[in-house]
Amino acid sequence: MKFISWIQNSRLPRRLLLLLCGAVTTLVFVGAITPTPTLRPVAPEAQLGRVESIEEVAQKIDAAQAQAISELGLEKALPASWETICRRLSLALVGNGLSLEEYRTLEQIPADDRVSWWTDYLLADTRSSNYLSERLARAFVGTHDGQFLLYRRRRFRLWLAEQLQSNVPYDQIVRSMITSEGLWTSNPEVNFLTATFDGGNKNRADPVRLAGRTSRAFLGMRIDCLQCHNDFVGNVQLGSSDAPRKGEQIDFHSLAAYYSSAAIHAPNVFAGVRNDRRKYKATLLGDSDETEIEPNVPFLRDLLPDSGSPREQLAAWVTNPENKAFARAAVNRFWALLFGKPLVNPVDDIPITGPYPAGLEILADDFAKHDYDVKRLIRLIVTTEAFQRDSRIEDEATEVTSKHEESLAVFPMTPLRPEQVAASLLQACRLQMIDDNSSIVSQLERFATVNDFTKAYGDLGEDEFVTQSVTIPQRLLLMNGRFLRERVKENPTANASSQIAMLTRDNQTAINAAYMSVLNRLPTKVESDEFIELLAAKDISRSQAMAGVFWTLLNSTEFLWNH
C-alpha cells in the first residue's frame, strides 16, 4: 500500500517510473515475461483531497438505498469479488473485459486496493475517454454520418474524447456545443450544430432537432413530444414541485427558437457557422398560419440571463447549478454506462418534479457542487455498495426478482451491448491488452472487427439502454459466425487458445488461463475437471481442445452479460 502511494505521488521521470512499475509487477507466465500495464499519472494532488469526501457521499447514497431496500423487505446481496467488479469497470469504461495481462497485473496489487487502483488506471487510460466519447456522442449527435462537406462526426468524437481525457468540466463541454461557432473542422464542437444540417434547410441548423437533443441529452426530458400538440395525457410535467403544469406545444417551439439563427452564409462558407437575425416560426395547434415565436425556456425562467446571444443565454440556463435537471440527466446517463441500465428508465425521461430513485438527488447535488467533475462522478458511483454488490443473493433459496434489481438490492444483470460483445470477444482471444500502444495491425483489427460485428449483431444506435435480451440470431452469429471461428482456430501467432495450448505445462494451468482470459475469474473445481478431461482426450490435438474450451466459454451466458 505504501509503495503504491509512493508511486502515485512520485515526481521521478515518467520513463523511470515505467521501468520501476514494470520491474515490480513483472509476471512470469509459462516461463515467459509478460509486459505489464503501468498506471499513468492521475494528478495525485487532486486525488488526495477528495478520497474521504467521495467515501462520505457514497455512504449517504448507500444509506438512502439501504433504507429503500429495507422498506421493500428485500435481502441485499453480499459484495461481489474483485474480479467481477473490475470486469464491470472495464466493460463500462473501455467496452471490453480484462485481458489476461491485465488480470495478472491486478493480482500483484494488494487485494483491498485492486478496485480503486483499477478505477484510477482506467480513468487515466485514453481507451476510457475514447470509449465514453462514443457513448456520449450517440446522445449528442446521433449515429448518422450527415452531410460530408458540413459535418465531421469523427472529429466531434475525438474532440469530446480530448475533453474527457483532460477532465474538462461537463457543463463547460455542453456550453461549448450549444454556443459553438466557426468551421466544423477547426472548431469540432460546431458539429453538434452541423449534424442537423441537410439539404432541406439550406445550410441552416435544424432548430427542432437541436431542441430535441437539448431536452433529451442535457435535461433528461422528452419535451420534443410537444412538437405537434399540447400534452393532453400528462406525460410531460413542467413548472415546479410546488406548481406543476402540463407541457404545451409552445414550450418546445420556444426552446427551438434559440437555434433559429445558426447558419452558414454564402459566399463565405469557410467562415463556418455564424449567427444571423432569422426569427423562428412554427404552425401551432389549431392555426393555419405560421406564428413567430420568441426564444424562451420551459421552466425555471428566473434563471435565464438578461444578456448575451440567444444560444449563450440558453447555454447559461441549461448548465446553471440551480437547474437540477441538467445534473440529474448527466448522473443518470453515467450511471447507465456503469451499470448497463439507468437509475431512471428511460435514460432521457426524468420527471422534473420527482419522485426520484434513492441516491439520484445526492449524486446530482455532488456533481454540481464539484464543478461537474466527470471523473469524480465515476469514482463516486464505483465506490457505492450498489456497484460493488453481487448479482446473486447468498441464500440460494431466495429468488432474485425484478424488485431486487430495481431497488439495487443486487447488481442488475444486463446483456452486453453489441460493441461490448465484439470488443470483449476480440480481447479475450488475445493474451495482451489491445490499447494505443499495441501494434497498428492489432488496432486496425479491433476497429474493423468491432464495427463489422456490431452491424451484424444489431447496433441499437441512440437507444443503447433499451432493455432487451440476447436474441436467437445473435446467439447463432456467435456460435457459427466467422468472427469467433477465426479467433479460436489453430493460430499460434495470434490466437490465445493456441498460445495457451502451446506454452502451458499442465492442463490445470491452461484451463485457469482460459477462464481468466474470457470470464475474468478462475474456474471452479467442477468446471476444471470437466475441461481437463477434454484436454486429456487423445482423438484431438491439445490446440483443438483449447479452441473448444474458448468456444464454449465465449458462447456462455456469463460472458454475454454484465453481472
Image (cartoon, helix red, strand yellow):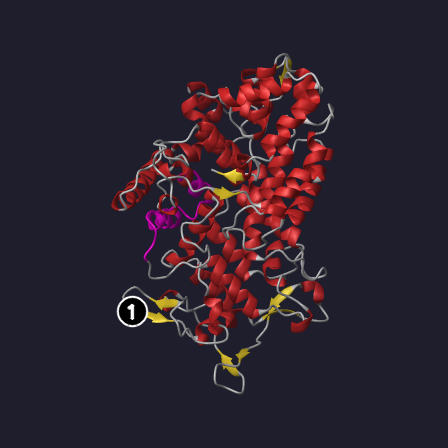
Residues rendered magenta in the picture: 355-380
Q: Position of residue 22 (x, y in %)?
A: 58, 19
Q: Check disc 1 and report its element: helix, strand or loop.
A: loop
The answer to whether any part of residue 198 appears in the image is yes
Compared with 326, 35 (above or below) is above
Compared with 132, 43 (above or below) is above
Q: How many marks?
A: 1
Magenta stretch, overall SS: helix
| Nearer to the camera, 431 or 196 | 431
Magenta stretch contains residue 64: no
- Answer left or right for 35 relative to 346: right
Q: Position of residue 75 (x, y in %)?
A: 30, 38
| Nearer to the camera, 369 or 524 | 524
Q: Position of residue 3 (x, y in %)?
A: 45, 19
x 32%, y 40%: residue? 62
x 60%, y 18%: residue? 533
Q: Which residue is mark 1?
A: 243
x 48%, y 26%: residue? 8
What is the quadrant of the N terminus in the image? top left
Quarter of image, res 535 = top right
Which amino acid, mark 1? Ala
